[in-house]
Image (cartoon, rainbow, N blue to C red):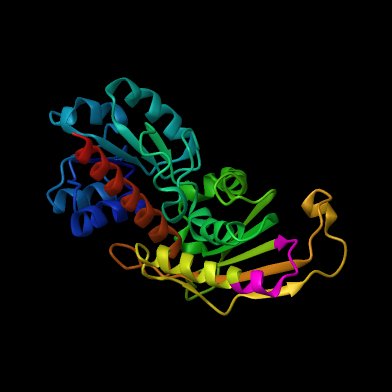
Amino acid sequence: MAVIGSGNIGTDLMVKVLTLGERLEMAAMVGIDPASDGLAKARQLGVPTTSGGVEGLIAMPDFAGIRIVFDATSAKAHEANARALAPHGVRMVDLTPAALGPFVVPAVNLEDHLDAPDINMVTCGGQATIPVVAAVARVTPVRYAEIVASIASKSAGPGTRANIDEFTATTARAIEVVGGAARGKAIIVLNPAEPPLIMRDTVLCLIDDEDPSAHQRIRASIGAMVDEVAAYVPGYRLKQQVQITPVTGDVRTLTGGAPATHQVSVFLEVEGAGHHLPAYAGNLDIMTSAALRVAEHVEATCSSRT
């Protein structure tokens, strides 16, 4: 496999493949700046590199053996990269908000899109919060789901900042498509606090279910889902107990006129594993961890078929 994008996300993904990968082998690190730290680290680790972008990747002598390409660039760049690689039959795992292919959140729908040529990893906020929305939705319908992802400003590089609009639109859509909410909304906060704080996520779901036993099932479903995500993102955890409280006031503007009786409030934090990035960069760690999970499963499935 190869990684396009020699920034923080791409470099962390490379290190994860080298240290944790069971079925994947790093064949190339691709960038556009010959002096980038990511390309330098790749060379130091013995990984073949090119600063010629996607065209440089295609021209590499071992390109024909590459089966999976991770794209850790930007939404706009991914569109060009996908067009260039489409004729070559490689599978793409997209870590940008471009959303050219189906949304995949490993704990929710890993098995649904294994044959897709371009798999989209949504966003860091989506990977952290959509599992919780899905956990509620598998117990009772979610009329509205709103997520707030708060990340350290220092962990948001140029690519993240350039994709803020795409982040909110892509995450909101995936809350509905993957999470199962009738309506979704996403908000991102770049927290400038020093020292930097680890990623915090708030998930609010409006439901129409007054049954106390359903509330207990919701709590159990969320707990099970948190454990499932933590299996591939060890720093993922509940910050406090799940809260289910009666709705006060008129929320019909949020639910499209549908009734809502209770609000489910879930508070999460995501601490990075520290493979390449600092612990506060949990927003980047959850993306690379989820992408690695998807690629390993795709490769395992392809191998079993052949």
From the image, which quarter does the C terminus lie in?
top left
Regarding residue 34, the answer to whether it shows in the image is: no
* Magenta-colored span: 206-216
Residue that extends furthest to the right in the rendered view of this protein: 250
Which picture quadrant has residue 290?
A: bottom left
Q: Going by the picture, which residue comes out furthest to the bottom?
A: 240
| Residue 262, x across and y down, in percent | 75, 68
Q: Is 80 or 184 nearer to us in this picture?
A: 184
Quadrant in which the N terminus appears: top left
Is 98 placed above or below 296 here?
above
* Residue found 38% across the figure and 30% down from its top: 81
What residue do we see at 59% from left, 70% from top?
217
Residue 129 x/y as whole percent: 54, 60
- Vertical placement of residue 246 versus 61, above or below: below
Q: Is residue 65 visible?
A: yes
Q: Can you give x and y, in whole percent of width and height, for residue 197 in the image? A: 49, 73
